Amino acid sequence: MNVFPQLRKLEQKYAGELAVVGVHSAKFNAEKATDNVRKAILRYEIEHPVVNDADFRVWQDYAVRAWPTLMFVGPDGRVIGKHEGEFPIDALDSVLSTMIDEYDEYGQIERAPLHFKLESEKEWERPLSFPGKVLATERGLFVSDSNHNRIVWTDLNGVVKAIIGSGETGLKDGRANEASFHDPQGCDLDYPMLYVADTKNHAIRAIDLESLEVRTIAGTGEQARGFRTGGGNARFVALNSPWDVEKVGNTLYIAMAGFHQLWKLDLTGRTVGIHAGNGRERITDGPLQRAELAQPSGIVSDGKTIYFADSETSSIRQAAIDPMGSVDTLVGLDLFTFGDVDGIGDQVRLQHPIGIELYERVLWIADTYNNKIKRLDPDSRLCRAAFGSGAVGSEDGDAAQATFSEPGGISAHQGKLYIADTNSHLIRVADLDSKRVETIEIRGT
C-alpha cells in the first residue's frame, strides 16, 4: 500500500501544491476487506487518504497494469503521465517541480490547504503495537514491538525484563533507552547478542543483553534500489527491507524481502552478500544464484538447510546452506495462486505466510492472511491447519475455535508456540499438548 514512502517528504515539501491519494487494489483476498485496509493504514502510518479499490474499478478505469503505479493528474483533472514501478526520489522531485512550475505559470494552482478527517489511534495506550515477530528462548521472550519501534524483553510469562529502544523512529546506536529503531521485525539470539532485522532502517542491529547496548552491524540506513548483485563491507552496503534473521555458526542469514533474496552476513569478517536469489520476483527453483524468490519474510534453519516463508508466492521453500546447493519449493505454485487448502505438495494453498519455525522436525507456519497456524512436514510435504478457525479475532480456546488476526511471527519453546498476533497487538501461546491457545498479558511496558 505505502509503496512510495518518499512521497511523505515530497508532500511536505510541496504542501499546498501536491495532493497524494492512495488507491489500494488488492492482490490477496484478505487485503480486500476494508477493516484490514484500515489496520494497514495505521500500521504503516499512512497519512494521506486511501481508496479501497476492492473491485478493481479504479485499476481498470486508469488502465493500470502493475504494482506499484504512479498516476500524475493535473489541476484540471486530466491524467498527464504514468510511471510503473519504483521511482527514485530525486527524479520524482524533479518531475513534480517541473509540473508545478508549468501549471503555476498559467495560474492553475490554488494553494489552499487540504483538510481530511484522518482516523488515528494512540499507539502508546496499549503494551504492544502491531508486533511483527517474537522469539522464545530459555532467556525469555523477545518481542519486536514494531510500531513502537522497540524490542520488548520479557520472561516467558510476559513480565518485562527490559525495553530496548526509545520508541522514537530513527537509526541511533547506544544505550537501550537512547537507541532508536524503525519497524524492527525478526531477531535471533546467541547470548549475549541479540541480532535484529531493523526493517525500515534497512539495517541489521546487534544488542548486547548484558550491557543493553545497541549497535548497527550492517546497512547504511538508506534503502537500496534496483537489483542487488554484489556485497562488501557490511556497514557500507545498502540493504532493502531485511525482515528476519537466523544465525548458523558464525553467519547470520537474512530474509531480504525488498531484494527478493536471501543474504548472509559474516559476523567475523563483517562482510555481507547474497546467498540465494537473482532478484527477480518469481518462484523458480534451481541453483542458489539462479533461483527466483518473492519477498521472503520468515527464515529458520536446522544447520544444513534454510527454510523460508516466500510471502508473495504464498509458498514455503528451502535453500541449501552449501553454496553449491539449490532452492526447492515445498508448497506453493506461483505469484497468483493462493488460498486455504490442506493437502500434500502442490495441493496445498497458503495465503501470504510471513512467519516460520522449525520444531521437532516440523515446520510451523504463520499463515498470515488465512489467520491460521499450520504445520508442514518437510519430508512428506503434508500441510494442514493446526490452530485457528480462520475467522479474524483474538479469541482464546481450543485449536479449532481460537482466532487470530494476521499473525506474522512464530517461535517454539518447550512444547509451546509463541505467536506474534500482529493485528491483535498481542502475543499468543499455542500449547502443542493441550491444543489450546491462550494470550500472554504483557506487564511492565
Image: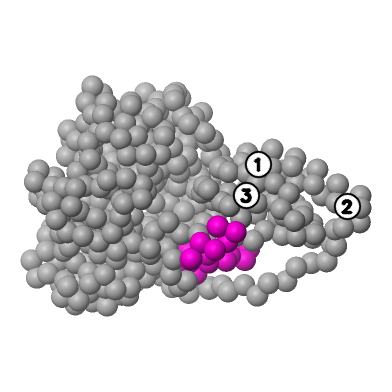
Q: Nearer the viewer, residue 129 or 283?
A: 283
Say if the magenta span includes residue 333. Answer: no
Locate residue 383 relative to residue 9 in the image: left or right.
Answer: left
Residue 379, position as x, y percentages in the image? 9, 43
* Dot 3 or dot 2, earlier in sequence: 3
Quarter in which the C terminus is drawn: bottom left
Which residue is drawn at the image coordinates 51% and 61% (left, top)?
A: 56
* Dot 1 or dot 3, earlier in sequence: 3
Q: Nearer the viewer, residue 44 or 25?
A: 25
- Could you say which quadrant of the image residue 266 lies in? top left
- Could you say which quadrant of the image residue 233 lies in? top left
Say if the magenta span includes residue 40. Answer: yes
**Residue that label 2 marks:** 104
Amino acid on which the number 3 mark rests in the picture? Leu
Instruction: Please report the bounds of the magenta region as a residue range.
Output: 37-61
**Residue that label 1 marks:** 89
Which residue is drawn at the image coordinates 33% and 73% (left, top)?
A: 392
Amino acid on which the number 2 mark rests in the picture? Asp
Indicate the secondary structure of the residue bearing disc 2: helix
Residue 315's label in the rendered image is none
**Residue that label 3 marks:** 70
* Label 1, label 3: how far apart the Cα atoms are: 13 Å
Query: Are the residues flagged by discs 3 and 2 in contact, CB closer than 8 Å?
Result: no
Indicate the secondary structure of the residue bearing disc 3: strand
Indicate the secondary structure of the residue bearing disc 1: helix
Residue 295, position as x, y percentages in the image? 38, 44
